[in-house]
């Protein structure tokens, strides 16, 4: 294996796939990123729940396939100077060179690496900035308690041209509706995905115009949701369980409405929080065109 690629291209691809690396792998191979060199270079990583791939063109001298420590590769890639990066497989190690910077990466047993899931058929397209913003607004309400796995996820409800994202930790609820372009205008399906997975995907969508969304049908062997943009893909297994019904909690009408400046409100909340415990409720009193905390 031998190829050369621009450092910014390498960093972008490594950043994309490294988000799928396992923090507590059940097998050594899952610590690694696969570098597959054929007509192009493809990087891939997985924690068995999510899987990510990124392909890019490079000056390829020799084809090959190798598994290297993922987090080490990510740290090396981000530290390299803005120069072409050369990769050379030498026995059981990979030599990485960029200008005067040189690194040696050990290899991992690639024969132990699991097969990655196949990307489901594309279901439609959505503006990446709209999707990323909606995920960030909803993910904050997702639970952190792994003993309640259904509450650690974001419920994605797809009904024709509308996608509704919802998350709750039992104490708060966040819901956001966005529009998309489905291939089938009569589509009606839903999925429950890990909030962290969607949040990581949102971070990687910065600077991308459009992302395709792929949802496996209920009859599929593997219940997957996939995201793709240009030469990058990510798949995630759906969480088991049923997301609690929430629409009845959303009031259809209100007795009053108030418009407040966000920055001023946040500053006030921070000041009040200095003299109270995080478990103590915060009372908001609306009166005479003022909000008292």
Image: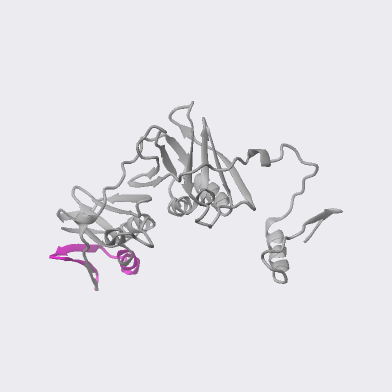
> Looking at this view, is 209 or 270 the one in front?
270
User: Which residue in the rendered view is the most extreme toward the top?
Assistant: 186
Query: What percent of the width, then of the height, locates residue 215?
Result: 42, 37
Quarter-of-image position of residue 13: bottom left
Please identify the residue farthest to the front as the structure is shown: 147
**Residue 9 is covered by the magenta coloring:** no
Furthest toward the right, the residue is: 288
Image mark count: 0
Compared across the picture, whether 183 is left or right of 40 comes to right
User: Residue at image x 34%, y 67%?
Assistant: 75
Residue 15 falls left or right of residue 251: left
Name the side, left or right, on which 229 lies relative to 288: left
Depicted 212 relative to depicted 136: above or below? above
Magenta stretch in the rendered image = 73-100
Image coords of residue 55 (percent x, y): 29, 50
Residue that appears at 43% across and 48% down: 208
Q: Position of residue 260 (x, y in %)?
A: 74, 53
Residue 1: x and y in percent read 15, 58
At x 31%, y 41%, the residue is 118
Quadrant where the C terminus lies?
Answer: bottom right
In terms of depth relative to the viewer, which is nearer, 241 or 213? 241
Residue 17, located in which quarter of the rendered image? bottom left
Give the residue at the far bottom of this rendering.
100
The colour scheme used to paint the residues is one colour
Which one is nearer the viewer's eye here, 27 or 55? Answer: 27
């Amino acid at each position: 294996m031998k190829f050369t690629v621009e450092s910014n291209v390498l960093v972008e691809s490594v950043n994309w796939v490294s988000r799928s690396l396992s923090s507590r792998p059940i097998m050594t191979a899952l610590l690694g990123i696969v570098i597959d060199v054929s007509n192009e270079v493809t990087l891939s990583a997985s924690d068995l729940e999510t899987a990510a791939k990124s392909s890019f063109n490079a000056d390829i001298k020799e084809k090959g396939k190798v598994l290297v420590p993922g987090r080490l590769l990510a740290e090396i890639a981000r530290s390299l100077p803005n120069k072409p990066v050369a990769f050379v497989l030498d026995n059981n190690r990979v030599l990485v060179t960029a200008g005067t910077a040189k690194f040696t990466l050990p290899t991992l047993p690639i024969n132990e690496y699991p097969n990655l899931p196949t990307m489901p058929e594309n279901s439609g397209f959505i503006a990446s900035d709209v999707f990323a913003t909606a995920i960030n607004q909803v993910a904050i309400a997702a639970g952190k308690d792994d003993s309640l796995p259904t509450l650690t996820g974001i419920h994605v409800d797809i009904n024709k041209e509308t996608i509704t994202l919802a998350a709750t930790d039992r104490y708060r609820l966040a819901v956001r509706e966005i529009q998309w372009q489905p291939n089938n205008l009569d589509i009606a399906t839903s999925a429950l995905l890990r909030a962290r997975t969607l949040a990581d995907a949102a971070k990687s969508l910065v600077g991308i115009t459009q992302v395709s969304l792929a949802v496996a049908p209920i009859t599929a062997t593997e219940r997957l949701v996939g995201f793709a943009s240009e030469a990058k893909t990510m798949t995630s297994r759906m969480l088991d369980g049923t997301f609690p019904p929430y629409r009845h909690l959303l009031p259809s009408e209100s007795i009053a409405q108030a418009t407040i400046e966000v920055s001023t409100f946040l500053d006030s909340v921070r000041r009040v929080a200095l003299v109270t415990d995080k478990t103590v409720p915060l009372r908001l009193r609306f009166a005479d065109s003022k909000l008292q905390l």
